[in-house]
Amino acid sequence: MRTGVFGGSFDPVHNAHLAVAELAMEAAALDRLLFMPVCAQPFKIGKSLSAGAHRMNMLRRAIGGDARFAAVDTELARGGVSYTIDSLRAIRDDGERRGEIFFLLGADMLLMLEKWYRADELLREFSFVAARRPGSADDEAERCAARLGAVYGTRVILMENPKSDISASEIRRRVRAGEGIEGLVPASVGEYIYERGLYQP
């Protein structure tokens, strides 16, 4: 059993998130992928986010009936700032069969991973899928992955990030401006945004 964990604001979840999830499933041969919305991010203290219930509901709509995916409220239920080591341990120990757990992150964050909270434990206990930006140089990420493997025994799988101009901030801006968001989010998520009046001025 190989389980992926995809953390993020998901405010809102959009088509680029789903594309990354699909690529990660293939790159790491994952059996299941869990979308985990943050409550508060250590690197973005003070950033205002939509209510966790809205973000979870949008994720559930985006996932639909795809049994490979699920949304988990691990960090929302805990509240406050969450650290990756605590969240992954909670998922690992929640009683469900998880097997090897892979945390998804960008290749830029992979380079900073040794500076994360309790990084030594994190790197020894869990695996990672790192998405490289399209057109980026591979050498630095590959050297970092090799070093983490040699020093901590960490498994790191590198994959290509899908080329996309979609961002949650642009979607929120378009909603505020009364512009369309078709093609940027799943139709069911777009309906939810307008039904609930999210991102309105």
Image: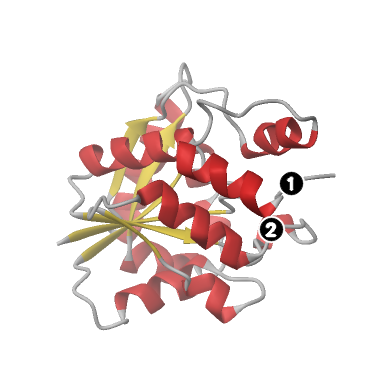
The residue under label 1 is which amino acid type? Answer: Tyr
Q: Secondary structure at mark 2?
A: loop
Kindly identify which numbered label has been placed on residue 50.
2
Query: Residue extending furthest right?
Result: 201
Q: Position of residue 46 (x, y in %)?
A: 80, 60
- Few, some or many C-alpha atoms within 10 Å of disc 2 (few <14, some 14-19, many ≥20)? some
Q: Position of residue 144 (x, y in %)?
A: 41, 41
Identified at 41% across, 26% down, the residue is 162
Q: Secondary structure at mark 1?
A: loop
Quarter of the image that includes the C terminus: top right
Q: Are discs 2 and 1 less than 8 Å apart at CB?
A: yes
Identified at 33% across, 36% down, the residue is 158
* Foreground pick, 77 / 156: 77
Q: Position of residue 82 (x, y in %)?
A: 58, 71
The residue under label 2 is which amino acid type? Answer: Ser
Looking at the image, residue 41 sits to the left or right of residue 148; the answer is right
Residue under label 1, please give it.
Answer: 199
Looking at the image, residue 50 sits to the left or right of residue 15; the answer is right
Q: Position of residue 100 (x, y in %)?
A: 22, 63
Which sits earlier in the primary sequence, circle 2 or circle 1? 2
Q: Closer to the camera: disc 2 or disc 1?
A: 1
The reply to whether residue 7 is visible in this rendering is no
Q: As displayed, is residue 195 above or below residue 142?
A: below
